[in-house]
Each structure stands twice: as structure tokens, then as C-alpha cells.
Image: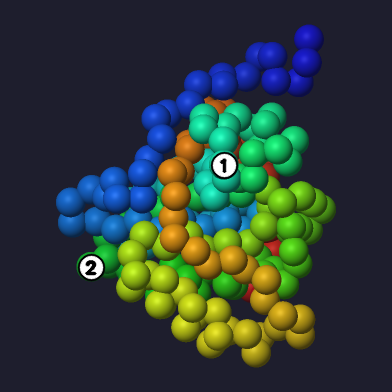
């Protein structure tokens, strides 16, 4: 029996960049292992929902095993649904920059591979502009150049059920660096 055999590998349907609930907004961030990123954003006031998944790759319906193999081009990411009347996109960007190292290509802490890259995937031209300005504004915080990719969001593929709310359910998954 392999390590994944007893896990619920059910996946929710894909989410397109334009699938945004009325009155809410969406943001997509990649900052290493999605468990810690999901947990971080779940605690931001004004965030309605956070889903762990895969984005910015070339394969349809990617699985965790495929993404980890490095063959799909996807990043582990989170899809954040938020109420812009309670939290701004700029505030979410600030949380993103504070809680990972955006200067390490294809790596966060002990996690190594292109799926752990730093990325901001934007849902509008306005988000794209805000993300670019935000990257420039925080560059002085780091001694190395920021390698975070900023590009338009593509299809977001929710990760398997066992990845959702992983840290909350298991008490494990603290794989992120806080307060850079």
C-alpha cells in the first residue's frame, strides 16, 4: 500500500479566472507549500474562502502526484475569495510578501521544485498593476532580487480533498516563514 492509497483524492471542478461571486473578488497566490499559505489567508479578516490547488501549468486536471513530478508546470497556489469592502487587494498583497521568501527561485524553505515558486496570478488589469507596484515597493526589504512571477490568472485546479484545510484538520503544515 502506497502513501496516497488511503487518501481522498476527490477534486472539485476547475475555477476559471472570471468565475467571481457577486460582490466579492478573487486573488491567486503561490508562495511555496499551499498548506501554510491557505492557513495564513484563512485568518485575514474579510477573506471569505481559501482553496488550495494548482495554477499556471499546461496540463488539465493535474493531480498532486503529477504536479510534484514537475511535468505539468503548475505551482501550488491558493485561490482567495474576499470581500473588497472589508479587505483590499493591496492588504492581501502585503500578507503575501510578509509570509514567504520571494527571492528563492523554485523553493520555499525545505520544499524545492518549480511547484513551490513564488507567483501572483492576477484576475484583472487593475490587480496586475497593483501587484507590479507592490513588488517594486517591497523590493528594498530583501537583500536579493525578487523572483516572483506576476502574470494573468489561468484555470485554477482545486487540489484533492485531503489537501483542503490540511493544517486546520491535522495541526501540521507549518512550512512557511513569517514576517520577512
Quadrant location, the N terminus: top right
In the displayed structure image, the side of residue 6 where residue 125 appears, left or right: left
* Outermost residue to the top: 1
Q: Residue at 70% across / 64% down in the picture?
A: 177
In the displayed structure image, the side of residue 80 where residue 65 appears, left or right: right
* Outermost residue to the left: 22
Residue 138 pos. (x, y %) = 58, 84
Q: What element does badge 1 sit on?
A: loop
Please state which of residues 90 and 130 is positioned toward the viewer in this rendering.
130
Q: Residue at 30% across / 50% down in the picture?
A: 18
Q: Is the Cβ of the residue at disc 1 closer than 8 Å to that at disc 2?
A: no
**Would residue 178 be visible to someone looking at this image?**
no
- Residue behind mark 1: 58
Among the two numbered marks 1 and 2 on one chain, the one whose residue lies closer to the N terminus:
1
**Crowd around label 1: few <14 · some 14–19 · many ≥20 (10 Å):** few
The CA span between labels 1 and 2 is 34 Å
In the displayed structure image, the side of residue 160 where residue 49 appears, left or right: left
Q: Residue at 62% across / 19% down in the picture?
A: 7
Residue 92 pos. (x, y %) = 44, 68
- Residue behind mark 2: 85
Q: Residue at 33% across / 73% down in the picture?
A: 126
* Outermost residue to the front: 58
- The number of numbered discs placed on residues in the rendered structure image is 2
Q: What element does badge 2 sit on?
A: loop
Amino acid at each position: 500500500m502506497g502513501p496516497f492509497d488511503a487518501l481522498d483524492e476527490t477534486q472539485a471542478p476547475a475555477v476559471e479566472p472570471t468565475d467571481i461571486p457577486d460582490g466579492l473578488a478573487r486573488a491567486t497566490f503561490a508562495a511555496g507549500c499551499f498548506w501554510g499559505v491557505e492557513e495564513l489567508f484563512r485568518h485575514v479578516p474579510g477573506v471569505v474562502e481559501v482553496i488550495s490547488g494548482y495554477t499556471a501549468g499546461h496540463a488539465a486536471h493535474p493531480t498532486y502526484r503529477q504536479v510534484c513530478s514537475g511535468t505539468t508546470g503548475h505551482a501550488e497556489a491558493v485561490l482567495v475569495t474576499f470581500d473588497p469592502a472589508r479587505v483590499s487587494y493591496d492588504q492581501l498583497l502585503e500578507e503575501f510578501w510578509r509570509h514567504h521568501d520571494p527571492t528563492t527561485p523554485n523553493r520555499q524553505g525545505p520544499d524545492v521544485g518549480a511547484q513551490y515558486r513564488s507567483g501572483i496570478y492576477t484576475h484583472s488589469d487593475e490587480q496586475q498593476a497593483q501587484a507590479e507596484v507592490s513588488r517594486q515597493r517591497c523590493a528594498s526589504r530583501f537583500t536579493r532580487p525578487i523572483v516572483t512571477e506576476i502574470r494573468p490568472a489561468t484555470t485554477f485546479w482545486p487540489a484533492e480533498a485531503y489537501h483542503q484545510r490540511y493544517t486546520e484538520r491535522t495541526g501540521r503544515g507549518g512550512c512557511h516563514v513569517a514576517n520577512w
